[in-house]
């Protein structure tokens, strides 16, 4: 099981950058797939990016590929989402998620608000 805490959300101007942080804690979560999602008002939660603790491989949605970068710091059990060239369409609550593929369990943080002013 893993506990996730996001931070770094803020109000930023269009064209700017922001880095979100997801601190993970718990036991036996290093086989989990770590993901970032976002949810804008009146929209469904949208997958953004994925990274594994045990592999350098990353996956991105088409909507953020080339602008967002997911990374991790194993020593801190932390996942990051670097977001560049932000637009008003990026305004949403951003969630860190972890999927346990062995038990098919999903874990979520409480989210962090990102607001991009145009």
Image (tube, grey):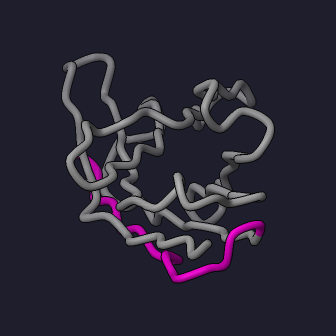
Q: Residue 50 occupies which quadrant of the picture?
A: top right
106 in relation to 40, above or below: above
Figure disc tally: 0
Look at 70% across and 49% down and name the residue there. 71
Depth check: give the residue in front, 42 or 1.
42
Look at 75% across and 71% down and name the residue there. 16
Q: Quadrant of the N terminus?
A: top left
Highlighted range, magenta: 1-15
Q: Quadrant of the C terminus?
A: bottom right
9 in relation to 57, above or below: below
The x and y percentages for residue 33 are 46, 31
Q: Main secondary structure of the magenta part?
A: strand
7 sits left or right of 21 in the view: left
95 sits left or right of 30 in the view: left
Depth check: give the residue in front, 14 or 23.
14
Q: Residue 47 occupies which quadrant of the picture?
A: top left
Depth check: give the residue in front, 96 or 100.
96
42 in relation to 99, above or below: below
103 sits left or right of 116 in the view: left
91 sits left or right of 67 in the view: left
Look at 47% across and 39% down and name the residue there. 34
Extreme-front residue of the structure? 118
The x and y percentages for residue 91 are 46, 61
Depth check: give the residue in front, 22 or 41.
41
Look at 59% across and 37% down and name the residue there. 53
Q: Is residue 91 magenta?
A: no
The x and y percentages for residue 23 are 46, 66
Q: Is residue 13 magenta?
A: yes
């Amino acid at each position: 099981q893993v506990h996730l805490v996001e931070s770094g959300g803020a109000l930023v101007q269009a064209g700017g950058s922001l880095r979100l942080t997801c601190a993970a804690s718990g036991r036996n979560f290093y086989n989990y797939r770590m993901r970032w999602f976002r949810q804008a008002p009146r929209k469904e939660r949208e997958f953004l990016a994925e990274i594994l603790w045990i592999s350098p491989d990353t996956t991105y949605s088409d909507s953020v590929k080339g602008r967002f970068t997911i990374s991790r710091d194993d020593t801190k059990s932390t996942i990051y989402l670097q977001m560049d060239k932000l637009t008003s369409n990026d305004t949403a609550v951003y969630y860190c998620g972890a999927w346990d593929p062995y038990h098919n369990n999903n874990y979520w943080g409480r989210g962090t608000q990102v607001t991009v002013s145009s």
